[in-house]
Image (spheres, rainbow, N blue to C red):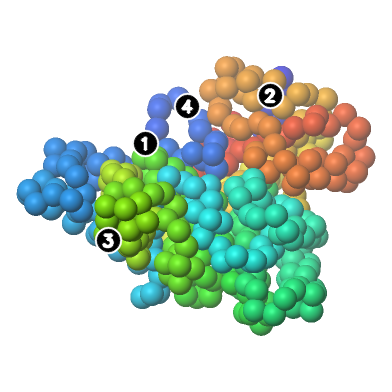
Amino acid sequence: MTVTLVPSLPTLVTPSRPDPLGVLGVPGEINLDHAASAPCARAAADAVAELLPWYASVHRGAGALSRRCTLAYERARQTVGDFLAARPDDHVIFTRNTTDALNLLARALPAGTTVVTFAGEHHANLLPWPRGSVRLPVPDGPSGAVRSLDAALSELSRDARPGLPVLVAVTGASNVTGERWPVADLARVARRHGARILVDAAQLAPHAPVDLAALDVDYLALSGHKLYAPFGTGVLVGRGDWLDAAPPYLAGGGATSHVGAATHEVRWATGPARHEAGTPNLLGAVALAAVCAALADADRDALHAREQALVGRLRAGIAALPHVVELRTFGPDAPRVGIVSFVVAGRDSAEVAAHLATAHRIGVRDGLFCAHPLARRLLTEAATRSGRRDLPPTALRASLGLGTTSSDVDA
């Protein structure tokens, strides 16, 4: 395979501190798979290393080690909540990842809740919801998403039994195309119809500030491993009433305030503890909080500008190759984060990914990216748009992060 570099690519201006988190990496390896799992930030590694000698039980010990770990865990909860602008009555619940957080919320829905999603969601935001949920078609643009949701909620308000809750579940940024969804506009529509709204921020939070209060959303989920804290934790943040009324996500120690001799003599805790039974992932929570604190102190506008220059450079290079077709849901100028999916005409995507890895030490993702309905639709549309009939049935995805450089993109 011959790789052609296009001399007319835009010039990238790199700020003096392009990576304030000190993202770790392997020399010589070009990692363009951040959307799957981002590398570890130095801030996360240092926070874990500092706490490891003190590692002990959380919430259930009187010794100095346990008290220190309990303090670290609850401080991490506060730091993550502050990073996401959680409101005073919001719960910040540590989970394993975004999928775990969304399944937790699905278990906590009041009986009869209708969940409205779009067909462009990651499987984590398609599969956990109860039967009878509404899946809207993939819109052709942000305004189309708003209109589609408005129409669907209007119809639900006419047809559903009065008083039954409705939850809108939408991504903040597509894990397939990187395109950003109009979350604030969708939240306004949900409010107008008395519905609640959840945002899957797994792909948005690593690239842009996320403010629950400003967006006016009820729930938000994200993964630490996509946010430079790959220590096996995630978070669900949001309104406490449904969460406090629901059965615990896991039954066990820490989720109870009283257990009697009889099997039915159980009083469950309220607040985050209700859904955090068992020994928590202390190191994961501390690592995630360390990254949140580092990002909160960083110049997010400068990081955004740098990433936009990189993703523009990548898309320009792809567009200049006649045998490569980019996948997109919205128009070519829609706002996006640093994720680009594409196909190489006449070449199997897995074969191309393997060649990039072995011959050029470039890591990308191939497949349908756990968003099969969306990816298959976009592949069909790409064939129609390009007029090519030799596009493969799966795609490639290059995703950028804080450690990505212009030379990585050029390669």
Q: Amino acid at mark 1?
A: Leu
Mark nearer the N terminus (1 vs 4): 1
* Residue 285 falls left or right of residue 238: left
Q: CA distance from mark 3 to mark 4?
A: 50 Å
Q: Residue at x 39, y 41 (%)?
A: 232
Q: Amino acid at mark 2?
A: Ala
The reply to whether residue 337 is visible in this rendering is yes
Mark nearer the N terminus (3 vs 4): 4
Seen in the picture, residue 78 relative to 187 is either above or below; the reply is above
Disc 3 marks which residue?
257
Q: Are marks 3 and 4 in contact (CB under 8 Å)?
A: no
Q: Quadrant of the N terminus?
A: top right
* Of the pair 12 and 394, the residue shown nearer to us: 394
Disc 4 marks which residue?
29
Q: Nearer the viewer, mark 3 or mark 4?
A: 3
The secondary element bearing badge 2 is classed as helix
Q: Amino acid at mark 4?
A: Glu
Q: Quadrant of residue 88?
A: bottom left
Q: Residue at x 58, y 38 (%)?
A: 409
* Residue 281 falls left or right of residue 401: left
Q: CA distance from mark 4 to mark 2?
A: 19 Å
Disc 2 marks which residue?
350
> Any mark on residue 24, and which?
1
Tell me the crowding category of disc 3: few under 14, some 14 to 19, or many 20 or more residues within 10 angstroms, Cα based: few
Q: CA distance from mark 1 to mark 2?
A: 26 Å
Q: Amino acid at mark 3?
A: Ser
Q: Position of residue 393 (x, y in %)?
A: 80, 31
* Of the pair 43 and 102, the residue shown nearer to us: 102
**Residue furthest bottom in the image:** 192
